[in-house]
Amino acid sequence: MTKLITAAEVSLHNKEDDCWCIINGKVYDCTKFLDDHPGGGEVIVECAGTDATEPFDEIGHSEEAVKMLEDMYIGDLERDLAAEAEAAKKAQQPGLLQSIWGSIFGSS
Ligand code: HEM
């Protein structure tokens, strides 16, 4: 059975000798890979404990690189619907400047 791992759990593995990353909803233990990474271990350590999907995709990694992830796979990211709803709500709330702007010009 697939192991479900929360983002909170991933965030605890945020250093060079204990380095997990989320890429496209899957969780990878990259600790043993750091020395072998063609782009250097440091860039991965910088993403340790977080969602590295964006930096991983931005570099334009090859098919081969994506395949290498399989060896590091440890589980799927468990979606935290409450946290996602909260984040969506926050994103919809206008910031202070927007509110002031809205009260002057009649829209927010
Ligand atoms: C843990 C998952 C990762 C794997 C398996 C991986 C694998 C690879 C591989 C195989 C290459 C050689 C080029 C290619 O085949 O695409 C590469 C290059 C590179 N990677 Fe990653 N990578 C990972 C994560 C990351 C992250 C999170 C970043 C950025 C924050 C990153 C930045 C780079 C850079 C900058 C290069 C280019 C190095 C150069 O050409 O000098 N990688 N990676």
Image: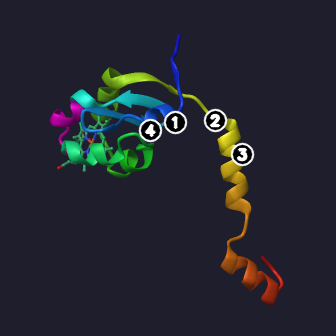
Q: Position of residue 18 (x, y in %)?
A: 30, 31
How far apart in space, not on screen, are marks 1 and 3 (Cα)?
Answer: 15 Å
- As measured in the structure, the alpha-carbon distance from the residue carrying label 4 to the one carrying label 1 is 6 Å
Q: Position of residue 11 (x, y in %)?
A: 44, 38
Residue 11's tag is 4
Crowd rating for badge 2 (residues with CA inside 10 Å; few <14, some 14–19, many 20+):
few
Does the magenta portion include 102?
no
**Closer mark to the observer between disc 2 and disc 4:** 4
Q: Amino acid at mark 4?
A: Ser
Mark 4–mark 1 CB contact (< 8 Å) = yes
Residue 66 or 74: which is nearer the viewer? 74
Q: Are marks 3 and 4 in contact (CB under 8 Å)?
A: no
* Residue range of the region highlighted in magenta in the rendering: 33-39
Question: Residue 34 falls in which quadrant of the image?
Answer: top left
Amino acid type, callout 2: Asp
Q: Is residue 20 left or right of residue 25?
A: left
Disc 1 or 2, which lies upstream in sequence?
Answer: 1
Considering the image in quadrants, where does the C terminus appear? bottom right
Q: Position of residue 25 (x, y in %)?
A: 51, 34
The residue tagged 2 is: 80
- Asked if the residues shown at circle 1 and circle 2 are in contact, with their CB atoms under 8 angstroms apart, the answer is yes
Answer whether residue 34 is magenta in the image.
yes
Q: Relative to 31, is 104 above or below?
A: below
Q: Quadrant of residue 6?
A: top right
Looking at the rendered structure, the secondary structure element under dot 2 is loop
- The quarter of the displayed image where residue 28 is located: top left
User: Label 4: how many residues lie within 10 Å, few (<14), some (14-19) or many (20+)?
Assistant: some
| Residue type indicated by callout 3 | Ala
Q: What residue is shown with label 1?
A: 7
> Where does the image place residue 30, in percent across and percent down from the top left?
30, 31
